Image (cartoon, helix red, strand yellow):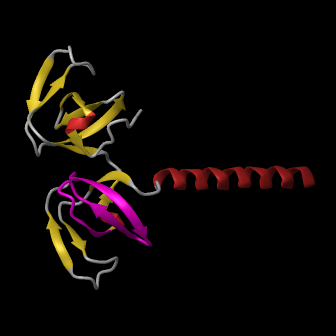
């Protein structure tokens, strides 16, 4: 019977370790990029509902950079550089980016000589994935291509995403 108890304790310890590892995976340490997950999200001057709202965002998927965490609140920076606090439930781990600077060419593969599929103007927001060697796959409502990471706000130039 003691062997059974030892096995149960070992399995429980492994499960607890897996849960802790998963929780750590889901909550990266700042700074990190994320996006606004709600259709309406208030930015506040401090981490609490009693602090005045400074902005009302009505653009879901807008990329943000989380720069600090306090309990269930996240201090975020938007693409314009404005910082403030948002309730963590309004922030999504879905990675998005915004075209910045000038019109950006999206290509059929991550290379300068690759065929141009389409072009995106500054301010266009899309989901990003498969970032490597300065390029990211950028998807705007089903139209996807590879863009230079340096032309996107919401991803580090040397960031790698699976």
At 31% from the left edge and 55% from the top edge, which residue is drawn? 65
Residue 53 lies in the magenta-colored region: no
The percent coordinates of residue 39 (x first, y second) are 18, 60
Assign the N terminus to one quadrant of the image: bottom right
Vertical relation: 43 (above or below) 67: below
- On the question of residue 32 being in view, the answer is yes
Q: Residue furthest bottom?
A: 50
Above or below residue 82? Residue 24 is above
Q: Quadrant of residue 113?
A: top left
Q: What x and y, as percent, mark residue 105?
A: 13, 27
Which region of the structure is painted magenta?
A: 61-86
Q: Main secondary structure of the magenta part?
A: strand
Q: Is residue 8 left or right of residue 54?
A: right
Is residue 75 covered in magenta? yes
Q: Residue at x 36, y 27 (%)?
A: 133
Q: x, y percentage for residue 157? A: 32, 37
> Which residue is found at the position 44% from the left and 72% from the top?
71
Question: How many marks on residues?
Answer: 0
Q: Position of residue 108 (x, y in %)?
A: 21, 19
Confirm whether residue 1 shows in the render.
Answer: no
Quadrant in which the C terminus is drawn = top left
């Amino acid at each position: 019977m003691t062997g059974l108890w030892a096995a149960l304790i070992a399995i429980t310890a492994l499960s607890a370790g897996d849960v802790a590892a998963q929780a750590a995976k889901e909550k990266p340490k700042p700074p990190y990029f994320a996006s606004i997950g709600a259709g309406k999200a208030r930015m506040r001057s401090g981490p609490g509902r009693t602090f005045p709202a400074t902005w009302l965002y009505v653009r879901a998927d807008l990329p943000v950079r989380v720069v600090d965490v306090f309990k269930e609140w996240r201090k975020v920076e938007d693409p314009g550089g404005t910082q403030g606090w948002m309730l963590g439930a309004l922030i999504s781990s879905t990675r998005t980016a915004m075209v910045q600077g000038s019109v950006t060419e999206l290509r059929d593969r991550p290379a300068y000589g690759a065929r141009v599929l389409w072009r995106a103007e500054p301010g266009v927001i899309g989901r990003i994935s498969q970032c490597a060697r300065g390029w990211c796959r950028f998807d705007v409502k089903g139209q996807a291509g590879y863009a230079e990471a340096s032309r996107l706000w919401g991803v580090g130039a040397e960031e790698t995403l699976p």
